[in-house]
Image (cartoon, helix red, strand yellow):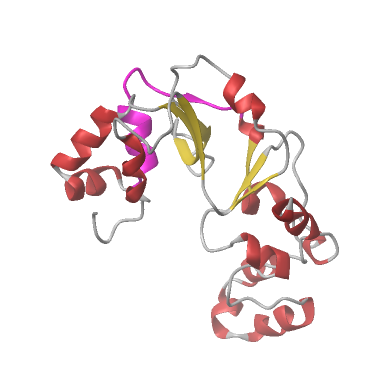
Amino acid sequence: MPTNTLGKWPKSRLWGEKLGNLTGTVLFVDLDVIIVDSLDPFFEYGEPDDVILSYNPSNPLERLGQTSCFRFKIGSLVSLQEKFKADPQGIADEYRFEQRFVTRNAPGGVKLFPKAWVAHFRRKCRQPFPLNYIKEPKIPTGARIVIFPGDLYPTHAIEGRYNKNAANNAKDHLKRLAEPKNLKRPLRHLRHFILPVGWIEKYWKE
C-alpha cells in the first residue's frame, strides 16, 4: 500500500474480479457510519450496472464522490485495480484520495446518490454556535446514513466529544478557550463543541 497518503487505499481490494463469495451488485459502507433509515433505495437508484458514490461536500466546485458509501457490480472495477497495482504510490500521489481515483477512472463514469441520503456529521448534523451548547446534533431531513469523516467518530459523539481529546461538557470546553492556540481562533473553538448524541447510540444498537 502507498505510504504517507490521505486516502483509504486498502479499499482497492474491493475492485477485484471477485469479492469473497458475493455476486452481483453490492453496497459498501464504512464501519464508522450510522444507518438511520432503510437502505433499499440505494439498490433501487440508477441502473444495476452503475457505479454510484455518495456525494462528497468537501470540494463543492469539484464533482467528487465519496466511498464511505458506494455501490458497484462486483468485477466492474477490475481496470482500476490493475492500474493501481501497476503504480500504487504514483496513483496515490496523483489523486491523493482513493475516492477521487474512482470518481475519475471508473469505467463508464460514476453517478452520485442524492445528496440528502448520506449526511456528513460535522457538516450537516451539528448545531451552529451558540445552539450547539443547548441542542444536540440532529438527523438531517432525508438522511439514510450518517458518515463520520475525520477524527470525530460515533463513539466520541455519543460521549459529547468533538474528538478523543475534547472535553465532554460545556464548562470544561469553555475553560480551554483560555489556551493560547484557542485564543488565536476563539470562534473555531466555541463551534467545536457538541452535546452527547443519544440517537447515535440508539441506531447503532439497532
Q: Nearer the viewer, residue 23 or 105?
A: 23
Residue located at (59% from left, 61% from top): 153
Residue 16: x and y, percent? Answer: 29, 34
Q: Is residue 82 left or right of residue 75?
A: left
| Relative to 36, residue 47 above or below | above
Q: Nearer the viewer, residue 92 or 154?
A: 154
Residue 63: x and y, percent? Answer: 45, 30
**Which quadrant of the figure contains the N terminus?**
bottom left
Most extreme residue toward the front is 21
Most extreme residue toward the top is 47
* Residue 155 visible in the snapshot: yes
| Relative to 18, residue 48 above or below | above
* Residue 160 visible in the snapshot: no
Most extreme residue toward the right is 134
Q: Is residue 175 left or right of residue 13?
A: right
Most extreme residue toward the left is 86
What residue range appears in magenta? Answer: 97-114
Residue located at (32% from left, 43% from top): 13
Q: Is residue 187 left or right of residue 138?
A: left
Magenta segment: does it hold 2? Answer: no
Residue located at (78% from left, 76% from top): 170
Residue 169: x and y, percent? Answer: 76, 77
Residue located at (71% from left, 85% from top): 175
Residue 82: x and y, percent? Answer: 20, 34
Kindly indicate the quadrant of the structure image that contains residue 145: top right
| Relative to 149, residue 102 above or below | above
Magenta segment: does it hold 102? Answer: yes
